[in-house]
Amino acid sequence: MSKVIYFRDQLKRPLRDLRISVTDRCNFRCTYCMPREIFGPDHVFLPRSSLLTFDEIFRFAKVAVSSGIEKIRLTGGEPLLRKDIEHLIAKLATLRTPAGNKIDLTLTTNGTLLGKKAAALKEAGLTRVTVSLDALNQDIFAQMSDSRVSVETVLDSINQAGEAGLKPVKVNMVVRKGINDHQILPMARHFRGSGHILRFIEYMDVGDTNGWNMQEVVTGKEIIDIISTEFPLKSREAEHHGQVAKSWEYKDGAGEIGVITSVSQPFCGDCTRLRLSPEGKMFLCLFASKGFDIRAMLRSGASDQEIQSRLASVWGARTDQYSEQRGANMPTDGPKIEMSYIGG
């Protein structure tokens, strides 16, 4: 059994989680992520030759797991648009931590293709899945996603994922005041007792194209207060260090919800996440401007030890804590990365 190596950054945060964006493409144009006026017909996406191959992603992930990574999440864009994604999942599912444990292998999707792929994804080795759904009302859902996909398609995908064993399914709802905040209670009613975990996300200033306005943020406390008017809640202890969502459970035992409060109650001090972009840049924060290229090393014959050393040096110099400094006069290296490019 090998000794576990935990790289730590300048704030002593360990490297535990790896989020891999496998594509910058998506079939939605969510207004808070990929607004159509920016990502229209003329938008130039990354060419296929620029994307990391599955072998390259696997190799980097293998080095990362040997360096302390315990959880890998596949994101996008919409990751299920990446052809044969289940082949990558099958490769990643073979990875073991130095202690011999399986990694927690998850995926975030908008649900449009999940119903058809759920069984194959589970068979390939996927552990769990998270599905984005911002409203039950079809008109509000269409406004938020800027798509023609039906709510029923997403709900059916959620159910098929659960039936395939990808559970508990986590359902993410981004809340924007004046747009879909009146859907908080209907969403809570729908998923109570379902076995799925509904998670509410404060509207964040990710990237520079979504027109973020603090006045449109519904805070986690406000969300809990709204739900508590109908369903009394009690808080739960965090299950692990670096947990993103604060957990609450219904007092009558009908399940749990989560609230992600990056704006009102930042959790930078516990952040253990490294992000890998589709073309092989390492990003140290969801709100970062600068990435660190690893593709060149993967394609130039660098050894695993050299790649690990690069990973250690990049993480070791990390000081990022954007959410805790939001609004301060922070230095910037340029425009922030877009969530559609690096994943949530």
Image (cartoon, grey):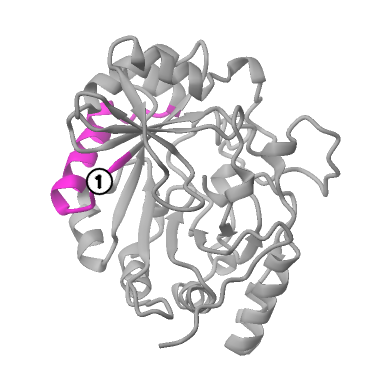
Query: In the picture shown, does residue 240 fall above or below 237?
Result: below
- Name which residue lies at 71% across and 65% down: 292
Query: Is residue 207 highlighted in magenta?
Result: no
- Name which residue lies at 64% across and 64% down: 281
The picture places residue 40, in percent across and down from the top left corner, at: 57, 35
Query: In the picture shown, does residue 341 fall above or below 72?
Result: above
- Name which residue lies at 29% across and 33% down: 256
The residue stretch that appears in magenta: 145-170
Q: How many marks?
A: 1
The foreground one among 8 and 297 is 8
Q: From this viewpoint, is residue 10 visible? A: yes
The picture places residue 176, in percent across and down from the top left corner, at: 51, 20
Left or right: residue 288 versus residue 221 is right
Query: Is residue 153 highlighted in magenta?
Result: yes
Q: From this viewpoint, is residue 146 visible? A: no
The picture places residue 207, in percent across and down from the top left corner, at: 66, 39
Q: Residues within 10 Å of mark 1 (few under 14, many from 20)?
A: some
- Rendering quarter of residue 277: bottom right
The picture places residue 265, in percent across and down from the top left corner, at: 59, 31
Under mark 1, the amino acid is Pro
The residue beneath circle 1 is: 168
The quarter of the rendered structure image containing the N terminus is: bottom left
Q: Secondary structure at mark 1?
A: loop
The foreground one among 303 and 70 is 70
Query: In the picture shown, does residue 86 fall above or below 166?
Result: below
Query: In the picture shown, does residue 170 fall above or below 143?
Result: below
